[in-house]
Image: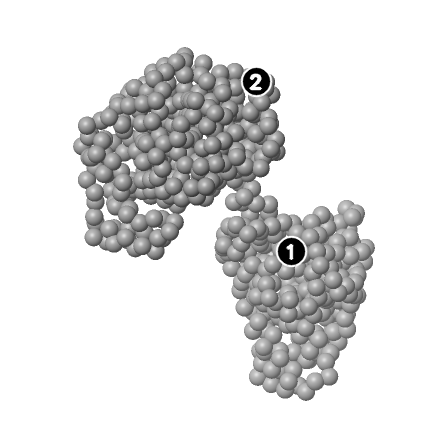
């Protein structure tokens, strides 16, 4: 007694012929079904290439399409030829043209000979199916599916919607309980012949012709009527990604496939020469005779699925971008945002670089130009200083900058004059450290030589922008590490908040700060704020600056910062 192999072929005929010859020359009769859409010349040439093998036969052809009854019809036709032509076949193994034997054929024959009455087919009820992705479970058995999901998608979806709306429900034939499973099975001659010769076959066929993806449910359901000796697993190794598409095996999967101890694997890339040469030669005999155990490689595939769906932190790829929430972290590393510091201190970027050794940029989101560190026009990863290019996708600009410089802390200035498109993005980023001196934007206005009416209008505009930004930072949804000081509180005692910021970033030395950056001259700033009030504008973000006071030479008691996170 031996094993008969049914092959469903529609492409890569050179590889399919190579595999069919391997099965046949090692004692397994083969029946091949070739998709009717294949050109007659190709079909004839394929038949001619295998004509020297007496135990290889071809069956009637069907025009096959994914998810339709045609695939079941093809396997039925091939099975009938197999049972009629080869009396010594005890098990029938269904495979595709892209399947590849991983172990010697003798191993499979011996394995099944020890289990002469066992049917190997995944067969589970719809409630227990964990692998249907983006499809239908119970509804595939209770609705009608006369339209092709691939070619007639609009009609398919509309017809399903109409049936749901009118609450249409098909009657399942008496005596059967719908089951699902992999389409690649290995059934005993007794079970397969019972399915094909059942007096109620026409009833079952008529019902399953309008079931969605019947090749994953027809045999899986009917096998329960004719056998109780079922191992609900496939002897064919097949892996699927998170979208339900099969993984394709390439040459670099050679050792992975050997570790699985499986008899057959699909889908094999037609140009994987190393796989075909290795497994269809004597080298395949090096594999152990252990029980097939695809679980050995499940961890690797799970990791691959996780990498594809979740990815590396801060790096988006085509399969996830720009879907909101599909990223694995918004950025890949910690960075610092300083608001108001460059306005309050002279050469703050040089001082900060000296203290922490980080890359300190100017205003990356300035309206006219990106202010990279050291006035660079092109930064890491070919990021340009063009504001227009940056503003085309500010989020991608920032995430790319952090990704391209991972391993080096990035710091940059920000303020109400800058592009505000990323306020929420940065606020919700756990990697962001945001330090704000509210109202410091008024210092450049204080030192400007502009008409006071223009200054008042600009101050009102900037204060409104910063107030909205601070509301975002104080939001319940904010995940960044945020510290906010009013300008009056900060200048009272700048060393304490500066020490706190430096400690959070990570300093080169654990000692306390020995020097502070030089603060700009604020003499007369309190009177400037009073003048704004006198003109009808209320500058409330700066804190309490008494008119006529010099905040540098007359410090008050330092106040604690407003700690958001």
Q: Nearer the viewer, mark 1 or mark 2?
A: 2
Image quadrant where residue 382 sits: bottom right
Residue at 72 percent of width and 80 percent of height: 448
Q: Position of residue 490 (x, y in %)?
A: 68, 64
Residue at 65 percent of width and 49 percent of height: 333
Q: Position of residue 37 (x, y in %)?
A: 40, 44
Q: Is residue 441 above or below residue 22?
A: below
- The single residue placed furthest to the top in the displayed view is 114
Instruction: Give the mark nearer the N terminus: 1 vs 2.
Output: 2
User: In this orientation, which residue lies closer to the viewer: 409 or 222?
Assistant: 222
Q: Position of residue 492 (x, y in %)?
A: 70, 65
Task: Tally the marks.
Answer: 2
Colour treatment of the image: one colour
Q: Name the disc covering residue 400, or none.
A: 1
Image quadrant where residue 155 sits: bottom left
User: In this orientation, which residue lies closer to the viewer: 539 or 221?
Assistant: 221
Q: Can you say which quadrant of the picture contains the N terminus?
A: top left
Question: Could you say whether the residue bearing mark 2 is in a helix, strand or loop?
Answer: helix
Q: In the rendered image, which residue does mark 2 sit on?
A: 285
Question: Could you say whether the residue bearing mark 1 is in a helix, strand or loop?
Answer: helix
Q: CA distance from mark 1 to mark 2?
A: 50 Å
Circle 2 Cα neighbour tier, 10 Å, few/some/many (<14 / 14–19 / ≥20): some
Q: Name the disc covering residue 183, or none.
A: none
Task: Left or right? Give the position of 438 relative to 248.
Answer: right
Residue at 42 percent of width and 22 percent of height: 55
Image quadrant where residue 498 sits: bottom right
Task: Left or right? Give the position of 110 relative to 540.
Answer: left
Q: Is residue 26 above or below residue 35?
A: above
Q: Is residue 339 visible?
A: yes
User: In this orientation, which residue lies closer to the viewer: 149 or 327?
Assistant: 149
User: In this orientation, which residue lies closer to the viewer: 48 or 178?
Assistant: 48
Q: Is residue 97 above or below residue 165?
A: above
């Amino acid at each position: 007694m031996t094993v008969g192999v049914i092959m469903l072929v529609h492409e890569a005929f050179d590889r399919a012929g190579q595999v069919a010859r391997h099965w046949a020359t090692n004692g397994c009769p083969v029946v091949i079904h070739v998709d009717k859409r294949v050109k007659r010349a190709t079909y004839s040439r394929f038949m001619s290439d295998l004509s020297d093998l007496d135990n290889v036969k071809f069956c009637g052809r069907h025009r096959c399409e994914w998810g339709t009854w045609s695939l079941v019809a093809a396997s039925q036709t091939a099975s009938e030829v197999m049972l009629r032509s080869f009396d010594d076949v005890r098990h029938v193994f269904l495979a595709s043209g892209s399947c590849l034997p991983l172990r010697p054929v003798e191993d499979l024959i011996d394995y099944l000979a020890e289990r002469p009455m066992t049917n190997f087919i995944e067969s589970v009820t719809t409630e227990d199916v964990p692998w249907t992705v983006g499809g239908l479970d119970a509804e595939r058995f209770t609705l009608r599916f006369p339209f092709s999901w691939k070619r007639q998608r609009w009609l398919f979806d509309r017809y399903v919607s109409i049936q749901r709306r009118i609450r249409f429900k098909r009657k399942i034939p008496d005596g059967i309980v719908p089951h699902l499973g992999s389409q690649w099975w290995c059934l005993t001659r007794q079970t397969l012949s019972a399915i094909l010769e059942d007096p109620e076959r026409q009833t079952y066929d008529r019902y399953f012709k309008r079931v969605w993806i019947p090749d994953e449910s027809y045999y899986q359901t009917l096998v329960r009527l004719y056998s109780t000796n079922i191992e609900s697993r496939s002897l064919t190794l097949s892996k699927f990604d998170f979208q339900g598409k099969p993984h394709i095996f390439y040459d670099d999967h050679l050792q992975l496939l050997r570790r699985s101890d499986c008899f057959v694997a699909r889908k094999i890339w037609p140009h994987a020469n190393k796989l075909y040469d290795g497994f269809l030669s004597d080298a395949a005999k090096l594999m152990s005779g252990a029980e097939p155990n695809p679980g050995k490689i499940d961890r690797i595939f799970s990791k691959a699925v996780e990498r594809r769906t979740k990815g590396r932190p801060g790096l988006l790829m085509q399969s996830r971008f720009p879907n909101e929430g599909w990223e694995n972290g918004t950025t890949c590393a910690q960075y610092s945002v300083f608001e108001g510091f460059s306005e309050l201190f002279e050469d703050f970027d040089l001082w900060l670089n000296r203290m922490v050794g980080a890359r300190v940029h100017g205003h990356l989101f300035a309206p006219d130009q990106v202010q990279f560190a050291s006035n660079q026009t092109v930064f890491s990863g070919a990021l340009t200083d063009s504001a227009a290019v940056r503003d085309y996708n500010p989020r991608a600009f920032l995430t790319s900058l952090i990704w391209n410089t991972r391993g080096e802390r990035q710091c940059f200035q920000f303020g109400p004059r800058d592009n505000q498109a990323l306020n929420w993005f940065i606020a919700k980023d756990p990697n962001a450290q945001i330090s704000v001196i509210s109202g410091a934007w008024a210092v450049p206005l204080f030192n400007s030589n502009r008409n006071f009416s223009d200054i008042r209008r600009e101050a009102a505009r900037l204060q409104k922008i910063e107030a909205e930004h601070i509301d975002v930072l104080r939001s319940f949804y904010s995940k960044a590490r945020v510290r906010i000081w009013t300008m009056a509180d900060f200048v009272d005692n700048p060393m304490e908040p500066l020490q706190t910021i430096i400690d959070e970033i990570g300093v080169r030395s654990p000692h306390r700060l020995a020097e502070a950056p030089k603060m700009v001259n604020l003499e007369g700033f309190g009177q400037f704020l009073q003048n704004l009030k006198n003109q009808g504008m209320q500058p409330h973000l700066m804190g309490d600056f008494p008119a006529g006071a010099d905040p540098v030479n007359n410090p008050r008691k330092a106040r604690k910062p407003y700690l958001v996170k």
